[in-house]
Amino acid sequence: MGAGGAGGLQPTAGSRGVTDTQLRRYEIFIIERPGRPPVHAGGVHASDGELALQNARDVFARRPDCHGLWALPAEAITSGSPVTAEPPTSVAPVHESYLVFGKPGHKGVQTFLGIVQAASPAEALDAGRKTLGGGIVDWWVAPERDRLATRPEDAAAMFDPAKGKPFRDQAFYPVDTMMRKLRRERDSRRAKP
């Protein structure tokens, strides 16, 4: 099972004692240019947040321009919108900052919309829906304390090396043509006595 705790290997729910070697999943948001909102790029698996950011850089920031990355543990994200109010609690709720993401259309991607103060994910969803706009088809919220982000001062060291590496499609490499030529040469040598 490996190391326990945050970021360690975790047993799968309902695994009945069987260990799982799956690493923790992080949802990745990419910031293409300064002043642009982070946009969901996909997910990576990693043992901790720092490794998640490094994996995300290698997977999502190789071709497009990238100014920064955010990583959120997938289990920290609450999706949807509340249908019913949460039951009242006898203890005064502790408010914290929640990051709010919205998908503006069925073909869009989750985009950072802003931050709300709330006592729970359901309350954050409701606050985000009321204050951050209409036309959103899907909402995500996550506690700001769970966000891992690259620092602006590290952007050059983290992202500039990929800029000098041109993307080459598989068609760039004429392997099939070369293999056919080698086979013809081999066959012509075999055919000669």
Image (cartoon, rainbow, N blue to C red):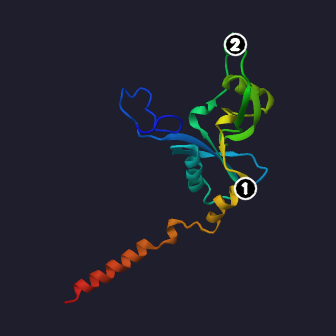
* Residue positioned 76% across, 26% down in the render: 127
Quarter of the rendering containing residue 103: top right
Q: Which mark is residue 57?
A: none
Residue placed most toward the observer, 81 or 54:
54
Whether tag 1 and tag 2 are in contact, CB under 8 A, the answer is: no
Query: Hey, which residue is sitting farthest top in the picture?
Result: 90
Q: Which residue is mark 1?
A: 153
* Residue 79 position within the rendered picture, expressed as x and y whole percent measured from the top left: 63, 30
* Residue 104 position within the rendered picture, expressed as x and y whole percent measured from the top left: 72, 38
The three-letter code of the residue at mark 2 reads Val
Crowding near the residue tagged with mark 2, few <14, some 14–19, many ≥20 C-alpha atoms within 10 Å: few
Q: Look at the picture and state if 121 lies above or below 178.
A: above
* Residue positioned 73% across, 28% down in the render: 96
Q: Give the quadrant of the C terminus.
A: bottom left
* Residue 59 position within the rendered picture, expressed as x and y whole percent measured from the top left: 56, 54
Q: Look at the picture and state if 118 lies above or below 29.
A: above
Q: Which mark is residue 91?
A: 2
Residue placed most toward the observer, 192 or 58:
58
The three-letter code of the residue at mark 1 reads Glu
Q: Give the quadrant of the N terminus.
A: top left
* Residue 45 position within the rendered picture, expressed as x and y whole percent measured from the top left: 51, 44
Secondary structure of residue under mark 2: loop
Q: Look at the picture and state if 14 lies above or below 189.
A: above
Q: Is residue 187 left or right of residue 179?
A: left
Q: Look at the picture and state if 14 lies above or below 52.
A: above
